[in-house]
Image: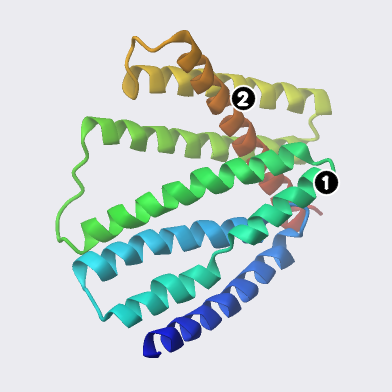
């Protein structure tokens, strides 16, 4: 009974936190895209990875308190049902690319956030330096590359809006960035992260996934750049 009570308390705090954080984000970015739910799930995934390592491996505490945090608070803070519903609404409205971007980014960013949380907890509370294998270094480089692409897409959006680029020039810039990113990411993963004797079908799948992720990232960055211009840079 005591464990159920602390889980219920943690769940109530998690639900209230999700309501407050999500609505604050929607108040800034609007509701054309489910930014609030995406942020909630990514931040919750990071906390799940970080606190799981912390509470189970580094500083074990009583089972009921672990359950209150991991099951109660984070279980109520994150929301798969809202993600599924908002994705369906985007499809129902004909916003297929937004729906695809939301689904793809949610999966990739949430899994990445859990991994980062686990690594940070293991590193910071172990008192050791981060030591990465060659394979892990390749992954880190890939993530940094994607971050640079995201930043570059934001920059293109800002410059295009402030200098009045014609729409066709903006399309060319975005398509060029999309093509280069897809090709470079595919080549990097082929040489660094997969075996060179991969089948043609596997390489095509890798190319397609990179193209899908690049399109989602560039579209999201462009929307963010447009929002920054409207909020802070418009006369």
Image quarter where the N terminus lies is bottom left
Residue 159 vertical position relative to residue 6 in the rendered view, above or below: above
Colour mapping: rainbow
For image coordinates 62% across by 44% down, the residue present is 103
Q: At which x and y percent is residue 105?
A: 57, 44
Q: Is residue 47 left or right of residue 58?
A: right
Question: Label 2: how many residues lie within 10 Å, few (<14), some (14-19) or many (20+)?
Answer: many
207 vs 1, nearest the viewer: 1
For image coordinates 34% across by 67% down, the residue present is 51
- Judging by the rendered image, the residue that carries numbered circle 1 is 92
Residue 59, picture quadrant: bottom left
Q: At which x and y percent is residue 222?
A: 68, 40
Considering only order in the chain, which callout, 1 or 2, is on the residue closer to the N terminus? 1
Label 2 and label 1: CA atoms lie apart by 27 Å
- Judging by the rendered image, the residue that carries numbered circle 2 is 178
Q: At which x and y percent is residue 55?
A: 28, 70
């Amino acid at each position: 009974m005591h464990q159920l009570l602390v889980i219920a308390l943690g769940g109530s705090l998690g639900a209230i936190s999700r309501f407050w954080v999500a609505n604050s984000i929607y108040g800034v970015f609007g509701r054309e895209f489910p930014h609030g739910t995406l942020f909630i799930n990514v931040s919750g995934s990071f906390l799940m990875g970080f606190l799981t390592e912390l509470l189970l491996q580094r500083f074990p505490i009583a089972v009921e308190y672990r359950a209150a945090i991991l099951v109660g608070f984070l279980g109520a803070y994150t929301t798969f049902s809202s993600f599924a519903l908002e994705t369906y609404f985007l499809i129902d409205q004909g916003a297929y690319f937004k729906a695809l971007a939301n689904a793809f980014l949610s999966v990739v960013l949430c899994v990445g956030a859990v991994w980062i949380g686990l690594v940070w907890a293991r590193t910071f509370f172990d008192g050791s330096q981060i030591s990465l294998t060659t394979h892990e270094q390749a992954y880190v480089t890939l993530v940094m590359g994607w971050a640079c692409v995201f930043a570059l897409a934001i920059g293109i959006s800002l410059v295009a809006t402030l200098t009045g680029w014609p729409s066709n020039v903006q399309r060319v810039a975005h398509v060029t960035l999309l093509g280069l990113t897809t090709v470079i990411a595919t080549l990097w993963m082929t040489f660094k992260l997969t075996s060179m004797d991969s089948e043609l079908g596997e390489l095509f799948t890798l190319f397609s996934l990179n193209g899908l992720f690049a399109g989602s990232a560039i579209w999201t960055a462009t929307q963010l750049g447009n929002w920054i211009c409207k909020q802070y840079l418009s006369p």
